[in-house]
Amino acid sequence: MQTKQPSVTVLMPAYNAGNYIAEAIASVLKQSFTDFELLIVNDGSTDNTLKIINSFSDPRIIVIHQENKGIVSALNNGLQHARAAYIARFDADDICYPDRLKIQYNFITAHPEYHIIGSAADYIDAEGNYIFTQHPGAHLYEEIQDLHPSVCPFIHPCVFYRKDAIVNNGGYNEHAYTFEDHFLWATILKKEKACNLSQPLIRYRLNPESITIDEKWRTRRFREIKYTALQSLQITAGDERELRQIVADQNLPKIKEGAYYALCGKKFLVNNFQPRKARHHMLRAISSHPLRLDNYLLYTISYLPEKLIRWLDKFTLRGA
């Protein structure tokens, strides 16, 4: 049992992450910065997640268990149990680069005026193949403040923050279903200073099993509730029930697979020009959800020259 208070708590919620969690845990244990605890909140997993966690013997791994209540409950539960003053968010299907903790810890301790530090991320597909590098919409605090409320300022599993800044602002709001982090940032950035580092510090895995799908696949009503909440900084239990019902109606393998392959296809086409890989993924998306016309459009466009595709992306593809 650990007795010394660690400098950093790596907070990792885990629900049925058996396909990826071993690689995620290993990437944390290989960090060049070693003064941390890896706090895993097992959110009622029913697969082999717990067995894989228990296969690691590193004393820095702490596991707490709860019934399956979702990521917001797991995060808030983890914050209550975290012993460190600094929290590094991380997901059970992602991969940390070796210097991730060292870079963010050194930055935030050298610049105590900052309470939240994000970064870029290298996005990978379910098999671990590099797709593209995602940069946040802004880096400097002043730029983050100028972002439109609809733009999330951070890539959540990249974020490194002061625990008290989050806890003192109420933690993650359970009613902001699927955008609990975005709602938290919208609230907290009016009080706390933050920035994004330009370098990628994790490999962020897209996979069809995730509850989070490309937002353009959500309903208009979903987006209406979300953006109204982000503008007003208010959200109710009734809003949460409606959001949960929308997500439940879409929580079908065909829809989730279609959203996953469509997103990968678009990124392989626009962000990392590999038209053959793009077409492969778009065909899978069409097969999963043949009534979405935007998939056919992106497949057809993939035969155009790269310069023309990049020009089209500026004006027409961003909403596709």
Image (tube, rainbow, N blue to C red):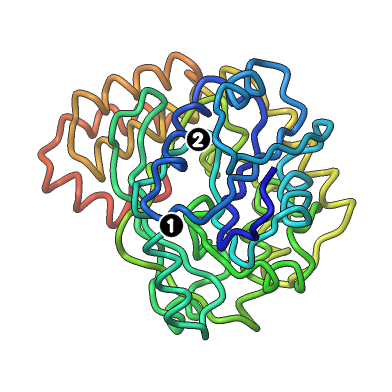
Q: Amino acid at mark 1?
A: Leu
> Measuring 79% from the left and 46% from the top, which residue is drawn there?
73
The tag on residue 101 is: 1
Chain-order first, disc 2 or disc 1: 2
Q: Quadrant of the C terminus?
A: top left
> Measuring 67% from the left and 16% from the top, which residue is drawn there?
47
The tag on residue 25 is: 2
Q: Is residue 180 left or right of residue 312?
A: right
> Measuring 25% from the left and 28% from the top, which residue is drawn there?
300
Between 138 and 68, the residue placed more toward the observer is 68
> Measuring 74% from the left and 70% from the top, which residue is drawn there?
233
Between 122 and 33, the residue placed more toward the observer is 33
293 in relation to 308, above or below: above
Q: Determine whether the residue tagged by mark 1 lies in a helix, strand or loop.
A: helix
Cα separation between marks 2 and 1: 14 Å
List the single residue furthest toward the right. 238
